[in-house]
Amino acid sequence: MRAGLSPAPKEFVTTPGIPPPPKIALPGEAPGTATPVDWASFFGRSGPVEIEIGSGRGRFLTDEAAARPGTSFLGAEIEVEYTRIAQARAEKMGLTNVRFARLDGKSFVLARVPEASLAAIHVFFPDPWPKKRHAKRRLFEPDFVRAAARALVPGGLLRVATDNLPYFEAIREVLDAEPAIEKVPGSEAGWSSGTDYERKYEKAGRPMARGVWRRR
Ligand SMILES: C[S@@+](CC[C@H](N)C(=O)[O-])C[C@H]1O[C@@H](n2cnc3c(N)ncnc32)[C@H](O)[C@@H]1O
């Protein structure tokens, strides 16, 4: 350690060649916290909770939070800079019912989200990892889908949009194979997430696919 520098926080100490552990602690929690999240104490109130995985610069979630003040929202975003931008946006808008956190959304849902605690999970334009050798990095695979379905309240929604049509087919397959959820009939049309990516692709006339699944 160089003189004058304090030791790196524990969560950032890594061994060369070994990836750091997934980021699953919320702001204010000790690094490595892995207990089930207490949503009421995190948000300082009870009521419905929704999360977005890969919330980017936070446009979708801040719009939702402004429109639905009775619901609490968490944006799980792996890139620290996007998390900061999104949080600043929420603060500028004076929103107290939305928070953004630097999290690995997949590990967070798998490890920390209690059963039947979410009214909705939003995933818009997830990284498609199109190369076969990277497919295991995709968000949508059976373990994640099982954990996401378990995290939803009965009737809770999992909403997905992407411009990568082959990935959408793979997503549809894995979601349709999960017995705890069912596709909402007609949910491939008639709505739009309004995220930054969606606006950009809409302008470019790029085809997109959408769908909503619901916990039985
Ligand atoms: C293509 S961008 C879409 C951003 C936003 N949803 C939109 O539609 O404008 C994908 C986002 O997912 C984030 N991301 C990728 N893997 C993630 C993970 N495991 N957990 C949380 N965020 C993730 C990326 O950093 C990026 O912000």
Image: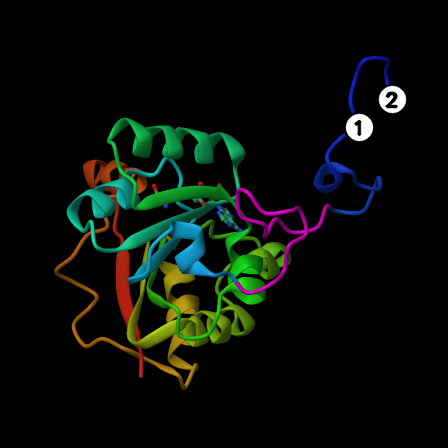
Q: Nearer the viewer, residue 112 or 76?
A: 112
Q: CA distance from mark 2 to mark 1?
A: 7 Å
Could you tell whether 107 is left or right of 81 in the image?
right
Circle 1 SS class: loop
- The boundaries of the magenta stretch are 20-36
Q: Residue furthest left?
A: 190
User: In the image, which disc is placed on residue 7?
Assistant: 1
Query: In the image, is the residue at mark 2 within 8 Å of ligand 1 by its beta carbon?
Result: no
Quarter of the image for residue 99 reads: top left
**Local crowd size for mark 2, using a 10 Å CA cut-off: few (<14), some (14–19), many (≥20):** few
Answer yes or no: is residue 125 visible. Answer: no
Q: Residue tagged by mark 2?
A: 1
Could you tell whether 70 is left or right of 56 in the image?
left
Circle 2 SS class: loop
Tally the numbered discs.
2
Please state, as top left, top right, bottom left or bottom right, where the N terminus lies in the image: top right
Majority secondary structure of magenta residues: loop
Q: Nearer the viewer, residue 33 or 209?
A: 33
Q: Are marks 2 and 1 in contact (CB under 8 Å)?
A: yes
Under mark 1, the amino acid is: Pro
Residue 7: x, y in percent? Answer: 80, 28
Mark sitting earlier along the chain (2/1): 2
Residue 165: x, y in percent? Answer: 35, 58
Could you tell whether 6 is left or right of 36 in the image?
right
Verify whether residue 30 appears in magenta: yes
Residue 54: x, y in percent? Answer: 43, 47
Residue drawn at x 86%, y 16% is 2
